[in-house]
Image (cartoon, rainbow, N blue to C red):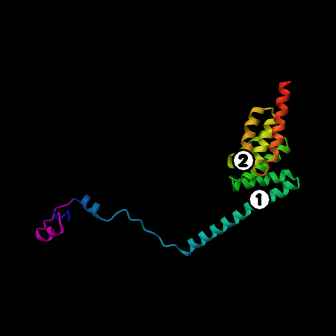
Amino acid sequence: MGYMGAKKVIDLRKKPKFIKITKAGFYESMVHNIDVVKKITMKHLILIFTFILFSLFAKANEKNFFNEAKDLFDKEKYEDSKFLFHRNIVYNPKDSASYLYLAKIFKIEEDKRQEEKNIKTTLLLDPKNEEAMYLLIDMELERSNFSKADELSKDFKKICVDMCEKVASIESRLKDFERKDAS
């Protein structure tokens, strides 16, 4: 309608007048920005199906890494279980249980830096993990950082569900320190 000088459809019938356009205007008026969509071939379907199967097997294997590592941990084969917990973390970086077991292994190996790092990672992923909180409180008490241990024990009381009996032992250790500090 614009090239015919008509503002309305009726004007096209009554007084059509063709306006000259440039070559650039002609090309601009043509259809553009159309993407050609290819059909999904059998080759693509097989590729997608293979990817889905691979994903399912990978999911099943990552559970096996954790279970296998936990079994080795229970059998006190710490080096082998440490390797599998690390492998499980590669496949599932948000698995707080693997970090917790690694912290336990590093506690046994007396590597305080790695123990603390893994406990803090566990609490970062799962702030209500009672066992990790208890291990961190125990670590702070061993360091004689009683103000931090007291602060953590208050948080521990809030999240306590399964390990509430540990609250009494924490409080008694803190009171022992207060008595020693007073004398």
Res. 115 visible in picture? no
SS category of the residue bearing label 2: helix
> Would you say the magenta stretch is mainly helix, strand or loop?
loop
Task: Report how far apart the C-alphas of labels 1 and 2 lie in the structure.
Answer: 29 Å
Query: Would you place residue 133 above or below residue 17 in this image?
Result: above
Amino acid type, mark 1: Phe
Q: Which residue is mark 2?
A: 159
Mark 2 Cα-neighbour bin, 10 Å: few <14, some 14–19, many ≥20: some
In front of the other: 117 or 55: 117
- Residue range in magenta is 7-21
Mark 1 Cα-neighbour bin, 10 Å: few <14, some 14–19, many ≥20: many
In front of the other: 6 or 159: 159
Res. 162 visible in picture? yes
SS category of the residue bearing label 1: helix
Residue at the top extreme, as displayed: 183
Q: Quadrant of residue 178?
A: top right
Quarter of the picture containing the N terminus is bottom left
Residue 150: x and y, percent? 75, 36
Asked whether residue 175 is drawn in magenta, I would say: no
The mark that comes first in sequence, 1 or 2, is 1
Q: Quadrant of residue 31?
A: bottom left
Q: Which residue is mark 1?
A: 65
Asked whether residue 8 is drawn in magenta, I would say: yes
Q: Nearer the viewer, mark 1 or mark 2?
A: 2
Residue 139: x and y, percent? 80, 38
Query: Would you place residue 33 above or below residue 83 in this image?
Result: below
Amino acid type, mark 2: Ile
